[in-house]
Amino acid sequence: MLAGASAAVLSLIQAPALAQEADAPNTATTEEAAPPAASTPAAESDKRLGVVQVTATRREQSILDVPLAVTAISPLEIERQGVADLRSLDNLSASFNMSSTQTESQGASLRIRGVGTTGNNIGLESAVGVFLDGVYLSRPGVALGDLVDLQQIEVLRGPQGTLFGRNTSAGALNITTKAPNLREMDGFANVTAGNLGLVNVQGGFSAPIVEDKLAVRLSGAYRTRDALAESTTGAESYTRDRWIVRGQALWQINPDASLRIIADYSEADEQCCDAPVTFDPLGDAGIYAAVGLPANGGVVESGFRAQKKGITNGEQFQNPFEQSGISATLEWDLGPADMTYIGAYRSFKAESIQHSDFVGLDVFQVGDNSTPFAAPDVQPSYDDIKTMTHELRFQGLAFDGRLDWLLGAYYSEEEIEERALMTLGGDYGRYVSALFVPSLGAATVATGFGGNIPAALGGVDPAGSYADNLYTQDAESLSIFTHNVFEITDGLNLTVGLRYVEETKDGAFDQLSASSPTCVNIANGLLAGAYPGSLAALAQSALGATCFPFATEADTAASAFLPLPRTFDDTFEDEELVYTVKIGARITDDVNFYAGLTHGFKSGGFNLDSTAAAGGADPRFDSEKIDALEAGLKGAFNDGRGRFDLAVFRQEMEDFQVLEFTGVQFQTFNVPKVVSNGFEFEVQNALTDRLSTNAAITYTDAYYPEDCAPGGYDPSNPVNRLCGFKLTNAPEWVGLLGLTWEDQMANGMGYFLTGNVRTESERRTSTQAVDDNGVPLEGDWQGENAKLNLRAGISSADDRWTFEVWGNNVFDESTKAVTFSIPLRGPARGVYLQEPATYGVTLRTRF
């Protein structure tokens, strides 16, 4: 099964160009992308691949010599696949995928080899770490800015613990931007226009202030796009309206020392992220009419048509955010050793103002105080993340160059503040009453309870109930590490890496204000035994429906006995020794072998949620650990015109971190055992002087074993009912296949045609596979699919400009990102969408 374009290594066209850039000092990198290989006479006679340099081991090495599975992606590959941010990186790496859910700041999940962190809880760190110019970006939402003015992206597959600042259990993305040019001025500008109102403008320039001593670089991007989904209420979702600017200064202090300072700022003002309803038995049966609501309960469109056409039913969801950062990198050749220091500070803030409850009724609002049933005058909901990091490394050679040693230390501080305001709307009481119609009968609910169960229990209408909650976490991480490569004999080397990590986190949930008399009355009535006969059972059920955790008072008298919100203030501490041991051997001049074991780690922490301590539960979750075995072959063939990379792996995880939304609350828990194993094969080759191909195939069997948790199968236990099922969004097979034709016309102008297809087998799209009764969840799978991208371009003879026509997902394949339970709507299911067909034109210039 093979389809799609491999990004495991650079495509043939840009590999020579990247090699030229990588061989030069970083201070002299000048071109945004080298001219196509076919446009130069030298390329016509020599189509051998250049040496692709990577820094995956904090050393510049040929990609064929690095003893781990790594994908190196150049800016030209990013351009030719239309990758604007990390969401589309799966077009370039078969083992990588990403999904987004409710918010940009929390709802993104990155996965490598089927392993990722599922859920939109800000307390969860990502299993796939993202590093920008050596600086750790602490949450996926922070890393989702536009990709502009890049030098390279490296996708490191498998746990990365001993070398990178934060420990990641699944892999890492190592992103580097282009440095200022100390010798000459250069620049670029790109303009893209496409369907859905797409406009994307990128540009930048580099200029020496004092030749060979001081240079600056400025780059930026602006992108806007209309909605991918529109509601029956007129609201829009999945819009783009964002910009970024990055400034750099590079000072060559002396021949042995340089200082690089990078500062960036970005903003977005976007609508995100309503979801079509794909399965709606209560609405389809017209049950809501029994409680005095429209028969469809606010869901006008549902099913596959709603998914295909991007038709939702909710109100607007605003998700503006801004972030800024500054970093300083000092590199100093001390003689016996090279020193590198990287210090950084980054701030990220996102607001969430959600009128959308996925239906066209007034059920609840998030972060909004302007509606008739609003909370008092409080701030909108927001996430605020501030991170400071310091890393110091020394590295050098010993024993006549046979030992390549590295020693380092890392320290980080992170402050998280999340404020979440939720208010119940005017339709809330009748809306949750409809949940009881199937069991009690429409007549009973309509006449006996008036469509308002709280009133029947002697309560009051829950409309206007609210909670203004504040979640905080202050974290410190300290580690010391070493990574050493010892040459045993010529062509045989041993790599040993160690990192000792200490993690400390102080987490708290504080309620600033709240009012939920309906919930409190029912809870107190239950404690007092005030409900006789059948009302007692009804009261138990109504407690869960009316005490919606995000809009309920915490620490009431009933909180000590019932599963209601409880505040907390606690500390999490952990320490771990992370290590890697690998052997590398040169089998022939063109083929290398490696094998090794890595023990990885990802810190635990706090479930920053109102329900985390409910019923006296511990709000903390444990650290995630992984043991990974990997072996691989890398080499060149076809007289240097081809390159391949084969890796076989087995990964066993302990205390795998999972977050699940049940339709009422978020649950965070650890699964004792998870397994991911398989193989990856990537190849690129020059078939002729003008035609090149690259391809990849990945097989991943990522699953919860049958014995993944103690106690045997129990559908009422969210941990046990995962056992025996696949991990979320982990297809067994992914294939990439790409072809590129490049040539010159008689007048010297160049042109190219490229096509890329990515295909995948079926994958499960929700966290849980079954409900708490053991019944499979509806619409839980995305079937096998293939997506084709096409691009054609023509460039001037001097390569100063290029004009391109392109289309992505040209056959408009409709696929699911994540499926979930619609809040308070019984078995109803919703789906977050992936990109539909897009097409447009791009003009690129360089000077």
Image (cartoon, rainbow, N blue to C red):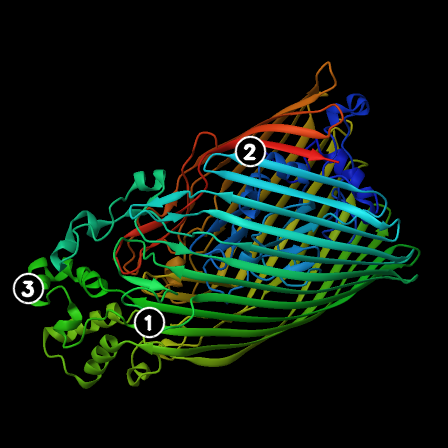
Q: Where is residue 162 in the image (x, y as percent from the top left)?
A: 70, 61
Q: Pointer 2 and pointer 3: residues touching (CB < 8 Å)?
A: no
Residue on which the image places disc 3:
447
Residue 615 found in image quarter = bottom left
Circle 2 or circle 3, nearest the eye = 3
Report the amino acid beneath label 2.
Gly
Mark 2: secondary structure: loop
Q: Which of marks 1 and 3 is nearer the N terminus?
A: 1
Q: Residue 375 carries which label?
A: 1
Report the amino acid beneath label 1.
Ala
Q: Categorize mark 2 by other alpha carbons within 10 Å: few (<14), some (14-19), many (20+).
A: many
Report the amino acid beneath label 3.
Thr
Q: Categorize mark 1 by other alpha carbons within 10 Å: few (<14), some (14-19), many (20+).
A: many
Residue 152 found in image quarter = top right
**Total labels drawn:** 3
Residue 68 shows in the view: no
Residue on which the image places disc 2:
4
Residue 651 shows in the view: yes
Circle 1 or circle 2, nearest the eye = 1
Q: Where is residue 541 in the image (x, y as percent from the top left)?
A: 21, 69
In depth, the one of 831 and 715 nearer the eye is 831
